[in-house]
Amino acid sequence: MSDTAVKHYIEELHRLQESLPGDKLSLIREAAMGQFQARGFPTTRQENWKYTDVKPIARSAFGIAEAKPATGYEKQLEHARLSGLDSHELVFINGRFSVEHSRSQDLPQGVVLEDMSSAVNNHSMLVDSVMSNTTLNDQSNPFNILNTAFIHDGVLIHVPDDCSIDKPINLIYLSGYSDNEFSAHPRNLIFLGSGARLTVIENYVGAKDRQYFINTVTDAVLSSNAALTHYKLQQESVESYHIGNLNIYQDRDSQVNSHSISLGGALVRNDIKVQLDAEGAGVLLNGLYMANGKQHIDNHTLINHLQQHTTSEEHYRGVLNDRGRGVFNGKVVVHKDAQKTDAAQSNANLLLSDQAEIDTKPELEIYADDVKCSHGSTVGQLDKDMMFYLRSRAIDEATAKSILTYAFAEEVIKRIEIEQIRHYLEYQVIGRLPDAELIKEFTHE
């Protein structure tokens, strides 16, 4: 099966290359496809994929997205614009950049914000500098390689030294508005100069009950004293497949705040890899995943403390209902030169049914002797005492469960600083619970 799937993607690459004669990324694509052909799709025999079987992706013949008009996305686009949020927006429909729906103006001097196909021609040196960063290009991840093999659309963001972009950049990916099942491989490259400040929102929204495959990679390089706040909001169709990689490299005194929210998708895998490579570098990873029905959501994180005086903080929470399955594997590695490291990691999971499942594996490897590190994981059901308290106040059982579930998830949402995103997620989470309108009354009095 895997050989057939790989052959299919080789044929799709040839079709893409023929549609882009003379494209500057042609050789990069060919080299990556050679690597993918040698490696193939991951299997459950590999430790990093032990609990996530990607056979449904491998056995589906997803073609590359066609560059033709789509319809039916207008309502979803308005939701994805996050009502009341003043932002720069780049919109992609079925993986293809839409000039018509994108809007960005009044960018500070020297800032580059362009779709990838334009950036390759206009800013090739910037693209090459990020693409050639060996700490970002994870050759062990087949989907990272597959993304490179189809690199075409996506975004290049460059913020020069001592520059701050006041408005967030909202990257909106609308998928499933096509007659055919398709795959899209967005590649986002972010480069922050010394002292630069940036907020980026990756917003993935899908048409209801449509099957497609999104395989996205975001590479971010932060120079000294730079700060990046990154939001990933994933609400794909519950019939779709979503694989996402976020690779981060941090220099001295840089700070990253990453918020990952996964609500959609039939099979979802989020990989985050962070390299803290200079003193003072710090990262916050904040995540929420909710799986209903037969959804499968897998979060793998890796934080490498490579130098002394670096910090990391990680908080992930999962809510699993029906036959939903979650996977969390959070690994923190403190290398031998990383003295005075301060690292904390926690993963809490709430099981709402007897058939829900979570596989959680927090990992901590320490090769230095002067560090402060902690990690832990919890799995449980709703608090019986709190249920009794709510029931004793004439709240029915279903509503009481929903209130407690929302309170559990809200611990992640409340760390989000942008009010419009926070409110948007509050209502998205509440909307997945029984008696949604009543819950809104209890939580927004």
Image (cartoon, rainbow, N blue to C red):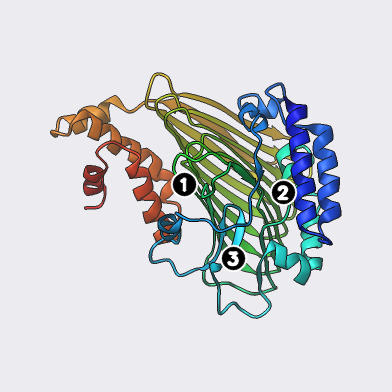
The residue that mark 1 highlights is: 207
The residue that mark 2 highlights is: 275
Q: Secondary structure at mark 1?
A: loop
**Which tag, 2 or 3, sits closer to the chain's start?**
3
User: 410 or 268, which lies in front?
Assistant: 268
* In-image side of 127 versus 376 (left or right): right
Q: In the image, is residue 190 above or below residue 317?
A: below
Q: Residue at x 59, y 73 (%)?
A: 164
For the N terminus, the quadrant is top right
- Kindly tell me whether residue 125 is visible in this rendering: yes
Question: Residue 300 lies in what quarter of the image?
Answer: top right
Work out how far the residue at label 2 is from the one at label 3, CA to CA, in angstroms: 19 Å
Q: In the image, is residue 299 above or below residue 385?
A: below
Q: Residue at x 24, y 31 (%)?
A: 398
Work out how far the residue at label 3 is from the one at label 1, CA to CA, in angstroms: 29 Å
Q: In the image, is residue 367 above or below residue 221?
A: above
User: 116 or 333, which lies in front?
Assistant: 116
Q: Position of residue 306 (x, y in %)?
A: 75, 46
